[in-house]
Image: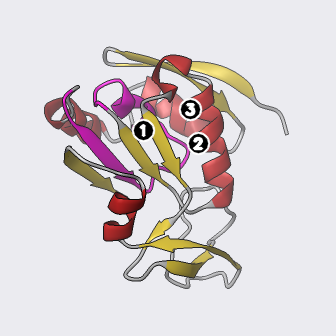
Amino acid sequence: MSSNIKTILKNDVNYSVISKPATEWIWNAIHQNKWEEQTFKIFDRFLNPENSYIDLGAWIGPTVLYGAHKAKHVYGVEPDPVAFNELITNIQLNPLIAKKVTCINAALAEESGTINLYMRSEFGDSTSSLIPTIAENSCKVKAITIHDLINENHIENINFIKMD
């Protein structure tokens, strides 16, 4: 599998990502202002250096990397093991913001423990779900309640939660 490092410029934010064939489309769309423009406008409005935010469904980091430049700290929660590994790689490619990001490999659920995460076509493609879908393939992942997420990670001073 080939991949390369790509620099993304989004509004006043600049960061590096690993661009793999399967995810190159997202980085190109963000760079060209063609992906979720309203999401970035909302981030610009609500994120600030005095407050942290929780990013539920962090995927490979498109909102985490942007938000880390705006917020005090980002707690990126992602249950998909393939996406989580790519998220970690993307954070490590950005040492200036890496200390401002805590990546949590878990799914938000009503009870903490373990839970099945189902894939639709493949893990890492942003479509995995706790709800059984067209594919029966699944893997066990950590499940965490919002209360346990906040307590276990000593999260405070949150003014924003992004959920995807």
Real-space Cα separation, disc 3 to disc 2, in angstroms: 6 Å
Q: Looking at the figure, which quarter contains the C terminus?
A: bottom left
Q: Is residue 7 above or below residue 35?
A: above
Is residue 98 found left or right of 152 in the rendered image?
Answer: right
Q: Quadrant of residue 63?
A: top left
Say whether disc 2 or disc 1 marks the residue closer to the N-terminus: 1
Secondary structure at badge 1 equals: helix
Q: Which residues are magenta?
A: 50-72
Secondary structure at badge 2 equals: helix
Is residue 135 found left or right of 155 in the rendered image?
Answer: right
Q: Residues within 10 Å of mark 1 (few under 14, many from 20)?
A: many
Q: Residues within 10 Å of mark 3 (few under 14, many from 20)?
A: many
Q: How many marks?
A: 3
Q: Is residue 88 above or below residue 108?
A: above
> Quick check: is 112 in the magenta stretch?
no
Residue linked to disc 2: 87
Q: Quadrant of residue 110?
A: bottom left
State if disc 3 and disc 1 touch (CB < 8 Å): yes
Residue depicted at 20% across the width and 44% down the height? 157
State if disc 2 and disc 3 touch (CB < 8 Å): yes
Name the amino acid type tagged 2: Leu
Give x and y (percent) for residue 8: 50, 20
Q: Looking at the figure, which quarter contains the N terminus?
A: top right
Residue depicted at 21% across the width and 36% down the height? 51
State if disc 1 and disc 2 touch (CB < 8 Å): yes
Residue linked to disc 3: 91
- Which numbered marker is on residue 64? 1
